[in-house]
Amino acid sequence: MPLPYALVRPLLFRLDPEMAHALTLRSLRALHESGMALFYAHARVNDPVDLLGMRFPNRVGLAAGLDKNGEAIDALASMGFGFVEVGTVTPRPQPGNPKPRMFRIPEAQALINRMGFNNAGLQAFLNHVRHSRREIPLGLNIGKNAATPIEDALADYLACLRGVYTQADYVTINVSSPNTQGLRQLQTDAALEGLLAGLAGEREKLAQVHGKQVPLLVKVAPDLRSTQITALADALVRHGIDGVIATNTTIARDGVAGLPHADEVGGLSGAPLRAPSSRVIAQLRARLGAHYPIIGVGGVMKPADAVEKIEAGADLVQIYTGLIYHGPKLVEGCANALAKLTPGQTALQPR
């Protein structure tokens, strides 16, 4: 019987958020490796979905960012997820932005972070990934080093793609974090065209060498204007990108204005992100058509929020901040709610 998260959360919330984050990951990994996963593990809901050329046991995944170095993949998978995504990884190790850089806003069930792709680098990341058991689909999320000029970003993404290619079930191209200076410029115009063309071309070469074509997805921001969403969607199709993850954190402060830490610089996640994320999902679905793979993420704090993402047009959903506020039971609750949906069900448009 898993330990009720309601008993653990007050203790974790007394700690600095980043310290609690690190302690939780270390503890999960230690419990899993010692055969004590029963303290947090949950049964995996059986609601299989075929997407991106693979089978997902259910439609609820872990979003990137919680396990940046891929240190606790198996421990996290045992919470009942249908898939797990880890990273963002960069070619070279980097410390990220100065601390403090993570802030809770409990009144709004939200977090603000400006971590800045802190990670141990590609080689350490791959060492962890190779030692995971891989019982469910695994996404690997790649980015650029902060010190790399934006005009040279493609080289970093290519280095990461080459490194992770044989280990990933899908690769996510993160161009939407607000915490690496200039990164979001890669979502627009010529910068996006060059990046996608370069990565798509390299993927074709890697596919020939390794005998398999690993799906590429792009993770986008919730702060894009409608015209930008349209242009981005068209670029994804034009360059043969296999799917899109909507969305990353937001720089807007709707829903937290006036609350402690609301003015901290960084990306806002949690409940206030729910509606903006669903809006972007719906716009992407309308532009991309019925069958283009979309993973919805942002503000999934209860099962009804996961259902909203599917109704907006997502095929799968991911959670992160909801896990921090509500614990592993949220995974099972969301997966059960989605399993009850009629195949193809959506309140907003036919699929």
Image (cartoon, rainbow, N blue to C red):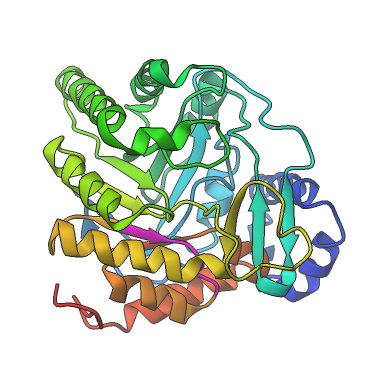
Using the image as rendered, state which of residue 58 and residue 152 is in the foreground.
152
In the rendered view, tell whether residue 120 sits above or below residue 51.
above
Quadrant location, the C terminus: bottom left
Range covered by the magenta-colored residues: 295-301
Judge left or right: residue 242 versus residue 118: left
Instruction: Name the residue rendered at 16%, 24% in the picture.
Output: 204
Instruction: Name the residue rendered at 32%, 84% in the picture.
Output: 340
- Residue 58 visible, this angle: no
**x%, y% of residue 250?**
52, 54
Instruction: Name the residue rendered at 32%, 27% in the picture.
Output: 166
**x%, y% of residue 170?**
32, 40
Judge left or right: residue 213 versus residue 2: left
In the rendered view, tell whether residue 81 sits above or below residue 172.
below
Using the image as rendered, state which of residue 157 and residue 249 is in the foreground.
249
Whether residue 205 appears in magenta in the rendering, the answer is no
Dividing the picture into quadrants, the one containing residue 338 is: bottom left
Quadrant location, the N terminus: bottom right
Dividing the picture into quadrants, the one containing residue 141 is: top left
**x%, y% of residue 84?**
45, 50
- Residue 94 visible, this angle: yes
Instruction: Name the residue rendered at 50%, 17% in the picture.
Output: 148
**x%, y% of residue 85?**
45, 46
Whether residue 300 appears in magenta in the rendering, the answer is yes
